[in-house]
């Protein structure tokens, strides 16, 4: 019995040692052969996350809300190279005049973009959207209240000069 226990313990130690040695050899070879900066891998360079901006110039996007703060409202968003004008076209906010805002848009997935509206004078966030043009779902975060979240549908009324990601 003692002999079988010793064999099992020795086997476990050998297996653990072999695993550690293999891990060390693989990570050492990868680190030594890497030409990428620390924290960046080949996968990240080819198809990984990016911070590339997307130009919505010419797009007219319509968002209609069924959940949250904007429930019952529909807005038309008209984009130029750097500005956006949001206009309520249905619901309780119709007739409200909103100022034109600066925006930054970034592709974050297939048929999905992140759009941040910024006050042109203060550079403060006015509105933030995640728009999925495949599922037609929009998530909206408009700071300034205790419940700033909304969700609903997004459609493209007019396409701009660049195809959606």
Image (cartoon, helix red, strand yellow):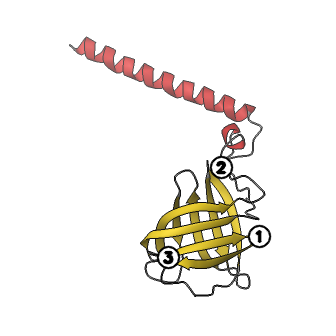
Q: Is residue 30 left or right of residue 62?
A: right
Q: Which residue is mark 2?
A: 49
Q: CA distance from mark 3 to mark 1?
A: 23 Å
Q: Which residue is mark 3?
A: 73
Question: Which residue is drawn at the image coordinates 44% and 25% (left, top)?
Answer: 16
Res. 104 image quadrant: bottom right
Could you say which is closer to the camera, residue 16 or residue 42?
42
Q: Which of pointers 3 and 1 lies earlier in the amino acid sequence?
A: 3
Tag 2, which secondary structure? loop
Could you say which is closer to the camera, residue 49 or residue 110?
110
Res. 68 image quadrant: bottom left
Q: CA distance from mark 1 to mark 2?
A: 25 Å
Q: Is residue 27 left or right of residue 38?
A: left
Q: Which of pointers 1 and 2 lies earlier in the amino acid sequence?
A: 2
Q: Which residue is mark 1?
A: 80
The percent coordinates of residue 119 (x first, y second) are 68, 81
Question: Which residue is drawn at the image coordinates 70% and 81% (left, top)?
Answer: 100
Query: Is the residue 45 above or below the residue 59 in the image?
Result: above
Q: Quadrant of the N terminus?
A: top left
Q: Nearer the viewer, mark 2 or mark 3?
A: 3
Query: Do the residues under discs 3 and 1 have CB atoms within 8 angstroms?
Result: no
Query: Is the residue 63 above or below the residue 44 in the image?
Result: below
Tag 1, which secondary structure? loop
The percent coordinates of residue 126 (x first, y second) are 61, 78
């Amino acid at each position: 019995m003692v002999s079988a226990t010793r064999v099992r313990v020795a086997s476990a130690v050998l297996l653990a040692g072999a695993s550690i040695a293999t891990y060390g050899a693989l990570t050492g070879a990868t680190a030594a052969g890497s030409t990428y900066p620390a924290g960046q891998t080949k996968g990240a360079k080819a198809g990984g996350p990016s911070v590339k901006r997307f130009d919505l110039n010419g797009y007219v996007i319509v968002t209609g809300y069924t959940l949250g703060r904007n429930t019952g409202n529909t807005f038309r968003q008209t984009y130029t190279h750097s500005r956006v004008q949001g206009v309520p076209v249905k619901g309780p906010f119709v007739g409200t005049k909103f100022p034109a805002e600066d925006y930054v848009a970034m592709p974050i997935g297939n048929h999905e973009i992140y759009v941040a509206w910024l006050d042109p004078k203060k550079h403060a966030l006015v509105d933030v959207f995640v728009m999925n043009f495949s599922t037609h779902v929009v998530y909206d975060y408009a700071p300034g209240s205790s419940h700033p979240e909304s969700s609903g549908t997004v459609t493209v009324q007019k396409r701009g000069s660049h195809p959606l990601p």
